[in-house]
Image (tube, rainbow, N blue to C red):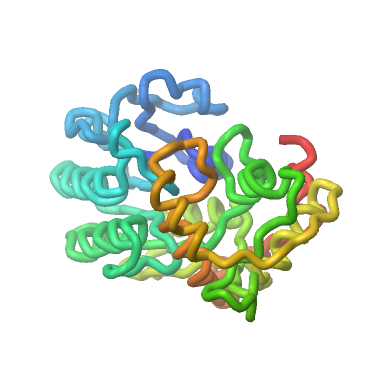
Amino acid sequence: MKVAVFGGTGFVGQYVIDELLNQSHDVKALVRIGSESKLGSISKIESVFGNVSSPESIEETLSGCDAAIYLIGIIRQFPGKGIAFEDLHFQSVKRVIHNAETLGVKRFILMSANGVDPNGTKYQSTKWLAEQVLKGSTLDWTIFRPSLIFGDPRGRVEFCSQLRDDMLSLPIPAPLFHRGLIPKNAGEFEMSPIHVKNVATIFVNALSKESTFGKRYDLGGPDIFTWKQLIKQIAAGYGKIKWTMPAPVFPIKFVAGALDRFSFFPITKDQLTMLLEGNTCDSKEVFEEFKIDPIPMNKDTLNYLNQS
């Protein structure tokens, strides 16, 4: 099968391309000029240099393909630099879907996110809008909603390594966020991290699996961690013991609201909102359906934190 990949230079994208090649698929990827060095397998794939905002680039990428996988996503936006949720999560997905229908590329896989919500943050609502467009299309679609994804970032942005660098490496206790002034349930919101290799395998295995057509899957790992447990797990992954302390989220949100347009500030107001909502799902049946073993988050699977 010849597969068009949008977002192949990203954290998840590099693993998806590796898995596509492992399963003997032909890969055609849209690559922004200047980002070609991010494709470790560039000599093994067909690259189209362009931008997802360009209908011509999209058409060239999809031409001659049997399927498309859309992986483009950002965790924070900088509208002044042309990096916005509305464009990358929604408008660009619309453009790719329209071109896929026009060119007869029937199979379409979309990476959404666990917890998307039409009334949520801009990140959540734009992901939700993209899902609605795909559901209303004529394509054989599958939507995957991963929870927190972890694994060796290979130089990209990844949650655990970013948390290590932005919070845990600082010479102060790690924050246990909580609502209100009283630290009741501080750091008790939960997540179910899933390994990037599991995500990639599921995406690629779904391509020819007709039973997945027209379905949405929530993807989470085998274990649920509270924020407090997650901090300790990540710290142990790179051989540290990290102290923690309760941190009321309101004043931090206030500061973040003023500074999150600046890249030096480590977290945005919306990211704090989504953190406290938690991010869990039970994917036991998904792993059984795809006949793969879930990779747990533990000291061994986090050993890349000592190397990256």
Q: Residue at x 73, y 43 (%)?
A: 169
Res 13 seen here = yes
Q: Is residue 31 above or below residue 239?
A: above
**Where is residue 190, by image quadrant?**
bottom right
Q: Is residue 211 above or below residue 93?
A: below
Q: Residue at x 53, y 73 (%)?
A: 179
Res 105 seen here = no
Is 303 left, or right, of 205 in this rendering?
right
Which residue is more in the foreground, 267 or 90?
267
**Where is residue 72, by image quadrant?**
top left
Which residue is more in the foreground, 264 or 88?
264
Numbered-mark total: 0
Q: Residue at x 48, y 38 (%)?
A: 10
Q: Is residue 162 above or below residue 193?
A: above
Q: Residue at x 36, y 55 (%)?
A: 110
**Where is residue 102, by image quadrant?**
top left
Which residue is more in the foreground, 214 or 280?
280
Residue located farthest toward the bottom when viewing the structure as drawn: 184
Quadrant occupied by the N terminus: top left
Q: Position of residue 16 (x, y in %)?
A: 51, 44
Q: Position of residue 272 (x, y in %)?
A: 49, 60
Is 209 left, or right, of 24 in this rendering?
left
Is 247 left, or right, of 44 in this rendering?
right
Q: Position of residue 146 (x, y in %)?
A: 49, 61
Quadrant occupied by the C terminus: top right
Q: Position of residue 285 (x, y in %)?
A: 55, 77
